[in-house]
């Protein structure tokens, strides 16, 4: 009874007819799907595991990152802007946050980057690149991207962020300061509108500006870090949601710290360090939750799919590959064009995370081809009218076999090999007479 009710509820939430429902029903369901997908990732522990790893790396690279940022800002005479940034980041820690900020600034201020020498400078840059690479790996894992940037790309992109980021930080602080001291504008508006409305307007702006800056910063992070193309709208939506979560959970953590006098009594001098580590963990968890939101907003077909469900059996993998070739061939012969991965996933009702691995294998095998451009489309990579279904399956199996090279020299029994070979021969006789074009057009001979 309960199982049947849960199945019906699951069908209502994840059913295919959601886009045909009224607006006031569609958007709550889409939001519920998004929250369920992110909640499932949190429950499975992948995000928490990545956040824990990033805490350790952050502690090791915290000072080198600040040292490089401090050097860049010092070059333009704006190095004093690091302290307000750290105070804002560690504000939930209360008095301990102010103490950590003061000690960190004192430590970074005493670092003389110019006298480190070649080896010291190389180690400093390496520790920073290692942190950025760890962040990219976490984001790639959320986006199901297997390939990371090459070493040359890492040095180019990461150092670019490290040198441009402090300048953007300086501009954001300068913009906020300019708004706070816009006395002429305030006086002009007060003269025509009155003091109360203007004070209310400026007060609202000063409350909103931090959220906007945080949202834009997180959106830029979500667009840059994954080694894949991230669209602007999902990044902005996820960035602003993350900015709000950061502020709200920061206030909640501040309340927790204010009432944690027992921790100071138990851990004594280590209390500030422990609270600092907890806040870094919460901060990274918020950032990774935002990255998951961005991924699921851009790829709604993957919301229902758990990581545990991505491993397909060989039989199901070949079945999906046949469906993929049939749809691509149908679109090519009827519309004289290719089909994008998003459209292919929607047409087959298969998550794009599952399809991506299969179509990439077929592209590597030469069965399919991928166009170049922002909206890349999949086309037949060889003539479908002369390529049999059996040839496609053999190409798919050959590429999969290359990924398991350690098992290629398995000591097999002769009867087993003979049995499998006889099965392949019989299957090849049946499938070798059917071309992919016939499959795509539904003209399979009897």
Image: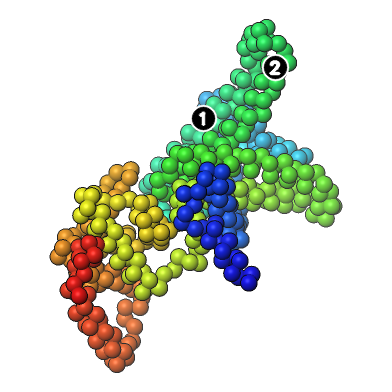
Q: Is residue 270 visible?
A: yes
Q: Which label sits on residue 197?
A: 2
Q: Residue 271: x and y, percent?
A: 77, 50
Residue drawn 16% across the image and 63% down it? 385
Residue 210 versus residue 339 in the image, above or below: above
Residue drawn 24% across the image and 80% down it? 427
Closer mark to the observer between disc 2 and disc 1: 2
**Secondary structure found at label 1:** helix
Residue drawn 33% across the image and 43% down it? 374
Q: Residue 161: x and y, percent?
A: 47, 38
Q: Observer-nearest residue: 26 or 194?
A: 26
Which image quarter is the C terminus in? bottom left
Residue 252 versus residue 170 in the image, above or below: below
Whether residue 8 sits left or right of residue 343 in the image: it is right
Sooner in the amino-acid sequence: mark 2 or mark 1? 1
Q: Observer-nearest residue: 304 or 419?
A: 304
Q: CA distance from mark 2 to mark 1?
A: 34 Å
Q: Residue 115: x and y, percent?
A: 53, 37
**Secondary structure found at label 2:** helix
Q: Residue 276: x and y, percent?
A: 69, 48
Q: Quadrant of residue 445?
A: bottom left
Whether residue 276 sits left or right of residue 318 in the image: it is right
Q: Which residue is mark 1?
A: 167
Q: Is residue 57 visible?
A: no
The colour scheme used to paint the residues is rainbow
Residue drawn 59% across the image and 69% down it? 4
Q: Quadrant of residue 251?
A: top right
């Amino acid at each position: 009874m309960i199982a049947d009710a849960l199945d019906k509820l699951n069908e209502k939430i994840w059913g295919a007819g959601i886009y045909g429902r009224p607006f006031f029903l569609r958007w709550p369901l889409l939001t519920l799907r998004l929250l369920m997908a992110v909640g499932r990732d949190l429950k499975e522990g992948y995000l928490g595991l990545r956040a824990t790893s990033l805490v350790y790396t952050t502690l090791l690279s915290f000072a080198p990152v600040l040292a490089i940022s401090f050097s860049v800002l010092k070059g333009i005479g704006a190095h004093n802007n690091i302290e307000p940034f750290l105070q804002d980041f560690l504000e939930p820690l209360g008095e301990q946050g102010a103490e950590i900020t003061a000690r960190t600034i004192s430590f970074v201020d005493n670092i003389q980057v110019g006298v480190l020498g070649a080896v010291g400078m190389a180690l400093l840059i390496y520790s920073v690149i290692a942190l950025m690479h760890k962040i990219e790996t976490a984001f790639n894992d959320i986006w199901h991207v297997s390939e990371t940037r090459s070493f040359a790309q890492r040095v180019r992109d990461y150092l670019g962020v490290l040198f441009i980021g402090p300048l953007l930080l300086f501009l954001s602080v300068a913009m906020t300061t300019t708004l706070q001291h816009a006395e002429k504008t305030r006086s002009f508006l007060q003269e025509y509108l009155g003091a109360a409305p203007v004070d209310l307007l400026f007060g609202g702006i000063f409350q909103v500006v931090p959220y906007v800056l945080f949202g834009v910063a997180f959106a830029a992070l979500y667009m840059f870090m994954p080694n894949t193309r991230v669209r602007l709208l999902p990044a902005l939506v996820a960035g602003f949601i993350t900015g709000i979560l950061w502020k709200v959970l920061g206030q909640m953590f501040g309340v927790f710290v204010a009432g944690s006098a027992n921790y100071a009594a138990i851990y004594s001098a280590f209390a500030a360090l422990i609270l600092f580590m907890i806040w870094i963990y919460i901060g990274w968890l918020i950032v990774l939750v935002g990255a998951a939101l961005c991924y699921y907003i851009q790829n709604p077909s993957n919301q229902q799919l758990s990581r545990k469900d991505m491993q397909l059996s060989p039989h199901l993998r070949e079945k999906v590959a046949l469906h993929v070739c049939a749809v691509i061939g149908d679109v090519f012969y009827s519309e004289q064009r290719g089909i994008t991965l998003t459209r292919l996933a929607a047409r087959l009702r298969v998550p794009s995370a599952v399809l991506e691995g299969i179509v990439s294998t077929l592209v590597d095998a030469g069965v399919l081809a991928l166009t170049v451009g922002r909206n890349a489309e999949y086309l037949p990579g060889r003539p479908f009218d002369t390529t049999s279904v059996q040839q496609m399956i053999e190409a798919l199996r050959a590429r999969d076999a290359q990924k398991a090279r350690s098992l290629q020299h398995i000591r097999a029994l002769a009867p087993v090999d003979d049995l499998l070979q006889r099965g392949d021969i019989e299957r090849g006789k049946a499938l070798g007479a059917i071309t992919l074009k016939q499959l795509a057009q539904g003209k399979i001979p009897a």
